[in-house]
């Protein structure tokens, strides 16, 4: 048991040392850039003095991950996309229904307004006819002599 533990610890230390050495070798820029950077840092100029001799940092790079091959992740992404499309479709349908309802309401109001105007006009016509009858003026029905009984 202790041999296995010491073997695992030794392997872990070796792995850490290897990754540390690998990371340091990748972190070093190429020789041409190193020489230019050290010359610039060693030879102070008016620009470096004004800047406070700050080291030059590379521009940050944006990494883009490729699509996952995990089927669960793919399903989750597909479900999220489908949900977004459904929500957008539902919202568009709701807006369309709202517009249709507003148009129908406006049409109904116009019909009610026209019906009120027609009713008012019919009432006014009936009132005028009744007033003429009361004043003793004959109407079209009273002018017909065939209706008169002897």
Image (cartoon, rainbow, N blue to C red):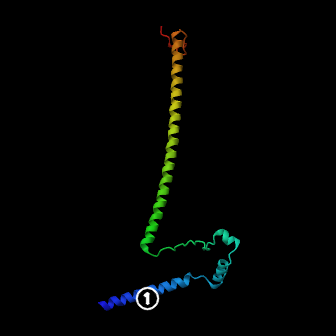
Classify residue 1 as left or right of residue 131.
left
Residue 142 appears in the picture as rendered? no
Occupied quadrant, residue 37: bottom right
Please rate how many residues cluster around mark 1, counting C-alpha atoms within 10 Å: few if below 14, some from 14 to 19, many from 20: few
In percent of the image, x 32 and y 92: which residue is there?
3
Task: Establish if 122 lies above or below 89.
Answer: above
| Quarter the N terminus occupies | bottom left
**Which element is circle 1 on?**
helix
Task: Establish if 23 lies above or below 138.
Answer: below
In percent of the image, x 46 and y 67: which residue is there?
78
Q: Which residue is mark 1?
A: 14
Where in the figure is residue 46, as x and y percent of width and height? 70, 71
Q: Nearer the viewer, residue 10 or 87?
A: 10
Task: Establish if 4 lies above or below 29.
Answer: below
Residue 94 appears in the picture as rendered? yes
Where in the figure is residue 7, as x and y percent of width and height? 36, 90
In percent of the image, x 43 and y 69: which residue is there?
75
Where in the figure is residue 148, as x and y percent of width and height? 50, 11
Q: Nearer the viewer, residue 74 or 53?
A: 53
In percent of the image, x 53 and y 27: which residue is there?
118
């Amino acid at each position: 048991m202790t041999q296995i533990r010491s073997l695992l610890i030794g392997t872990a230390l070796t792995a850490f040392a290897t990754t540390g050495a690998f990371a340091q070798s990748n972190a070093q820029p190429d020789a041409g850039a190193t020489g230019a950077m050290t010359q610039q840092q060693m030879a102070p100029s008016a620009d470096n003095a004004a800047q406070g001799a700050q080291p030059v940092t590379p521009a940050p790079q944006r990494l883009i991950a490729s699509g996952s091959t995990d089927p669960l992740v793919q399903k989750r992404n597909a479900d999220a996309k489908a949900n977004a499309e459904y929500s957008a479709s539902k919202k568009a349908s709701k807006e369309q229904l709202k517009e249709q309802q507003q148009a129908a309401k406006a049409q109904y109001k116009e019909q009610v307004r026209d019906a009120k105007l027609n009713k008012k006009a019919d009432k006014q016509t009936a009132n005028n006819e009744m007033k003429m009858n009361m004043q003793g003026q004959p109407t079209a029905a009273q002018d017909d002599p065939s209706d008169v009984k002897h």
